[in-house]
Amino acid sequence: MAESNRILVIHGPNLNLLGTREPEVYGRTTLAEIDADLAEMAKGRGVVLESLQSNHEGELIDRVQLAPSQERGILINPGGLTHTSVALRDALAGVGLPVVEVHLSNVHAREAFRHHSYVSGVAVGTVAGFGPLSYRLGLEALLAHLGL
Ligand code: DQA
């Protein structure tokens, strides 16, 4: 069990392109700006964030598996893996830490294939549709869930 107040923040495939990727859908805020904003918010609450972006499903799964020894919860935007990855879902379920799922866009107002999430069933809850604010709201919810 992690003793310190650490939270793992995971960004899935293509989120490294935020700022230039389909700005009409995802806005112009970069991932670095989102991470910096979250880190500042966490700092004010005595929480340290560890942030990882990867385009590789296995790398994300490997990091999730390490989380119980280092972090108390997981904030995750799984990107496209949301809609495809049983393996990522199984990893999240397997480590047993509280998970909050976030999406910049309102996935339910988009294409039908984005309406199903493999992650939602193992998450405490999901925040979607508020752009970078989704991450802040998600972190707030995870901190509250953890009593931090
Ligand atoms: C996303 C929504 C997903 O459907 C998409 O594949 C992404 C980003 C979001 O943050 O809105 O990569 O997770």
Image: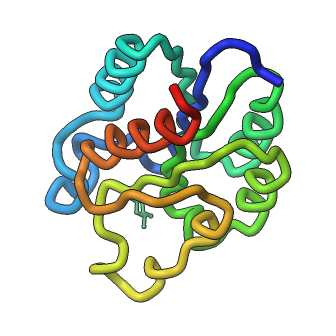
Spot occupied by residue 97 in the image (x, y as percentages of width and height)? 72, 42
Q: Residue at x 39, y 37 (%)?
A: 140
Residue 39 picture location, percent across and down:
39, 19
Q: Residue at x 49, y 33 (%)?
A: 143
Q: Which residue is drawn at 28% across and 26% down?
A: 33
Can you give x and y, in whole percent of width and height, for residue 38 in the image? 36, 26
Residue sitting at x 58%, y 27%: 7
Instruction: Say which quadrant the N terminus sits in.
Output: top right
Place residue 138 in its image quadrant. top left
**Residue 100 vs residue 88: left or right?**
left
Colour convention = rainbow
The total number of labels drawn is: 0
The image quadrant where one finds ligand 1 is bottom left
List the single residue furthest toward the bottom: 112
Residue 61 position, x and y percent, is: 76, 45
Relative to residue 89, is residue 29 drawn left or right?
left
Is 140 placed left or right of 53 in the picture? left
Q: Which of 101 and 53 is in front in this view?
A: 101
Q: Nearer the viewer, residue 135 or 124?
A: 124
